[in-house]
Structure formats: structure tokens, C-alpha cells
Image (spheres, grey):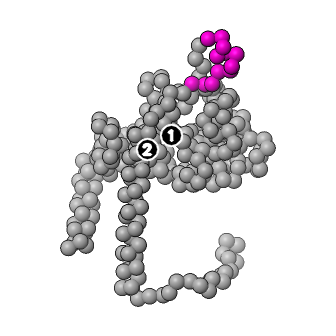
Amino acid sequence: MDKNRKRDSELPTNTPSVVSPQDWETARQRLLVKEKTVMRARDALAAERRRMPWRRWRRRTSLMAQRAR
Amino acid sequence: MEKTYEFDGPKGKVSLLDLFEGRRQLIVYRAFFEPGVFGWPDHACRGCSFGADQVSHLAHLNARDTTLVYASRAPQADIERLKARMGWEIPWYTITDSFDKDFGVDEWHGHNSFIRDGDKVFRTYLINSRGDEAMGTTWSYLDMTALGRQEKWEDSPEGYPQTEPYKWWNWHDNYDAEASPDPKWVEVSDAGEAAFRERDAEAKA
């Protein structure tokens, strides 16, 4: 027997209802509205990220080196 | 005198600037692979290894002038062995100085993004904690960079480099061969976009 094949585990008992294709599509369309809102919010967040200030970075020098300047 | 960060790479000492490999942008992921980390010396940290497994083909990111590298404290010999064992091809450097501390990744993993103007390097962003779990796709990397996906639909500051979406996409083994989009591909992707628009319009009608 294929060692990668596992025995079926038990499904939890409190799963959502099983519906007709039409009801499934209606439910999907309802969630899709929220998903699109989230996606657009993520685009807006990325746009804001592109406007984050930059910071010039150099290696932190030791206190001694800073005093010597 | 200004000092730069120094890393060990497969070909010896390199600077932070070298990590860009000549590209405009750089993302450095700090991965935990060093003595004291669970799995050493056979493996890197499990979370970081999980992350390395979901890194997409880098040709696409590179085509947007952006380099991704990993950096750890382990010596190059160990990194080389790890990459071979796990089948990872990400450029992977050894941190030799305060880079991890200075960029907030000395105790936990994180992605730092940089942009350069000639040889001047700027830090533009840091993603860490649960933010790291979404990283791996070309889009997640581009979205954390200063220039974004560099596509025309994006809301970016005036004058940022942007090209049409879809058109710059290529097969990962064909970017070098094809400097500008294949006209046939432009045609095909335009037709695909038009079909999507039509379907959306019908759905709304």
C-alpha cells in the first residue's frame, strides 16, 4: 500500500449545510463582495506603503568612533 | 570614514550594495540558521524553512529590477550544504556584523526592503511577525518594495516606473532572450483582458 495514503480521518460534526448549486453560487457571490473590498483595501495599503519615507542606512559605528568624529 | 555592511557570500566578502546584484531594489530575509537554533546543523529553523519552500521562481521578481536574498549567521559552507539538501536556489549570505541588530531582525525573522540611488542605499520597509507568512509570491515581494509592481493601474507617485500589466510577464527561462514583450503575447493578453471585461459587464447588466 502507498505509504503516503492516509486512512480517512473523521470529519467534524458541526460542518456547514449542504446546498443546491444555485444557493452555493448565491453564497459565493455574497462573500465575493467582501473579498473584493479586502483586495481593494490591500491595494490601497500597498499604495500607502510606496509613500513611506525612506531612511539612509549605514553601519552603526561604535560610541568611540562617534566621539572621534 | 563610512563603513558598509559586510557579508560572506559564495565568492567571498561582499557589501550590502553587492547584494543588489546591480538591480534597483533589494529584499533581505533574515533566516535563522546558526548554532543554537533547533535543527542545527542539518536544518534551518522550521518556520524559516517553511518560508524558503514557498519562495517562487525569482526570475519574475528580478525582471522588475528587484533582488531577493536570504541572510543568516551560519558560515557559507553550512549554507551551501543546506541549500543543496533542501533544493533551494535563493542567494543566501552570511551576516558578519550588526546588520541583523540594526535592521530589527536579530531576535526574530523579517523581510527588509531597500532601494539604491547609485551606491547610496535606503531602507524602505520592514515586514516581520505574521506578515512574513504571506511572503513568497512575486506579488507579495513587489508589494513590499518602494516601487511596487510597477504596473500602470497602481496608485504610485508621479513618474514612478510603470508598464502595462500582463505584458511584462514571461516564462522564467525567457526574460533574458526577450527584452521587450512579444507582439503575439501582447495580442493574446489583450484579448484575454477584453474577455474578462466583457464578462464583468454582462454580470453587472
At x 50%, y 27%, the residue is A56
**Residue B130 x/y as whole percent:** 59, 54
Using a 10 Å C-alpha cutoff, classify the residue at mark 2 as few (fewer than 14 neighbours), some (14 to 19) or many (20 or more). Answer: some
Q: Which amino acid, mark 2?
A: Arg
Q: Which amino acid, mark 1?
A: Tyr
Tell me: residue B196, above or below residue A1.
above
Residue behind mark 2: A49
Dots 2 and 1 on the same chain: no
Give the quadrant of residue A57.
Answer: top right
Using a 10 Å C-alpha cutoff, classify the residue at mark 1 as few (fewer than 14 neighbours), some (14 to 19) or many (20 or more). Answer: many
- Magenta-tinted stretch: A58-69
Tell me the chain of label 1.
B
For the residues labelled 2 and 1, the Cα–Cα distance comes to 8 Å
Tell me: residue B45, above or below residue B114.
below
View extreme (top): residue: A68
Q: Is residue A23 shown to the viewer in this render?
A: yes
Give the quadrant of residue B189.
Answer: bottom left
View extreme (front): residue: A67
Residue behind mark 1: B125
Does the segment drawn in magenta span residue B154? no
Horizontal side of A37 relative to B129 (left or right) equals left
**Residue A69 x/y as whole percent:** 61, 11
> In what quadrant of the picture does the N terminus of chain B appear?
top right
Q: Is residue B69 shown to the viewer in this render?
A: no
Tell me the chain of label 2.
A
At x 26%, y 67%, the residue is B200
**Residue B10 x/y as whole percent:** 63, 32
Q: Secondary structure at mark 1?
A: strand
At x 26%, y 50%, the residue is B186
The reply to whether the C-beta atoms of the residues labelled 2 and 1 are less than 8 Å apart is yes
At x 70%, y 16%, the residue is A64
Q: Secondary structure at mark 2?
A: helix
